[in-house]
Amino acid sequence: MVPHLGSRAQYGSASFKGKSGTMVDLPKRHSLVAQTADILETEITRGTWKEWLPGERALCSKYQVSRNTIRAALAKLQRSSVIATVHGSGHRILKRSAVKSASALNHDVALLMPVPPERLRPSQTLWIDELRALLGENNCLLRMYYGQQYFGRNPGQALSRLTSQHPHGCWILLRSNDTTQNWFSKHHPRCLVVGTVYDGLPLAHRDLDHRAICRHAAGVLLGLGHRRIALLVPKPAMAGDLESEIGLKEGISMSKRSDCEASICWHDGSPSGIGNVLRQLLTRKASPTALIVANTYHYLAAWSHLTQLGMRVPQDISLISRDEDQFLSYLVPSPARYI
């Protein structure tokens, strides 16, 4: 998880999903014409359009601004001799500055993830907006790309094509698996992993210490008298989930009690899959009395299934969320979680 960066998100630029599955950068509202002109010039420098710009209506739709704003931005580019307006034909591209291209490569930042932004957790979309605002204050753009093809078992071809067509100065990897991290460590070391890096990969990363969190959670639960603790994690597991498993087992072993048991329960991430795992767990002869759940959405699913099964939290079973999201504060009773 990336740390909270303040309240700048309200001033940040928005985003809009294009037809290709990429996210189109939308300009900030407090400098709309200048921001629009900068984005258009960056696209021209990158070679997005060959000889002619798209029509004004298409540009308005793509960047979600009015025609007056587009026309003012185009006039600014015309004064800078970047484009020329040809009556009856449109706007012709005059030059692509090599210096500008190098600058764009150094300062453009790309965010790569397996799913579209609307499927991310609220806390993740929040820091993305804040990151976009911070980059905008430094005249940098944030580009977003998503697709399962970049996170499969053999993503090399798709990643090579993506990074060659979009030569950004830095890539940020969100919810990345081992194959994606491994490819970037070999071919594009200028990247940052939002999350935990798999063991042995020399990549910069930013995350909470899930190992320490689950080790601490195990100690707290043991102190409350629990002796059978289960960790619910989705499969395939991310590096942070693997660290969580290690942390739970370390916490159990540190107690030096012979009657303690840790169970690692994998599920497919769906509400029904989580329900199936819980029913299997709770029908055991020695079922767990405490659960640690490694995702806020999965916590909601687990809490709902336990309620349907007639089990009260925390009277009948203890439930801890490893992760945090603001919406959890609206549950009653308030969930135990790490903030």
Image: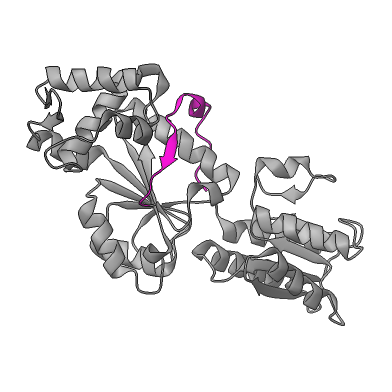
Overall secondary structure of the magenta section: loop
Query: Where is residue 329 drawn, in percent x and y?
Result: 74, 41
Residue 191: give x, y in percent of width and height. Answer: 32, 52
Q: Let me know if residue 7 is in the magenta part.
A: yes
Q: Quadrant of the C terminus?
A: top right
The image quarter containing residue 48 is top left
Residue 278: give x, y in percent of width and height: 77, 71
Residue at 84%, 62% in the rendered image: 306
Q: Nearer the viewer, residue 216 or 141?
A: 141
- Please provide the residue range marked out in magenta: 1-20
Q: Name the outermost residue toward the front.
A: 88
Whether residue 115 is in magenta: the answer is no
Q: Number of numbered discs present?
A: 0
* Residue pictured at 63% horizontal, 67% vertical: 233
* Colour pattern of the rendering: one colour
Q: Is residue 10 visible?
A: yes
Please give left or right for residue 198 compared with residue 183 in the image. Answer: right
Indicate whether 299 appears above or below 132: below
Displayed quadrant of residue 161: bottom left
- Residue drawn where x is 76% and y is 61% of the image: 302
Q: Is residue 199 visible?
A: no
Give the x, y percent position of residue 67.
33, 22
Side of 69 relative to 263 (left or right): left
Q: Identify whether 319 is placed above or below 107.
A: below
Residue at 32% x, 17% y: name it: 68
Q: Nearer the viewer, residue 36 or 222?
A: 36
On screen, residue 214 above or below 282: above
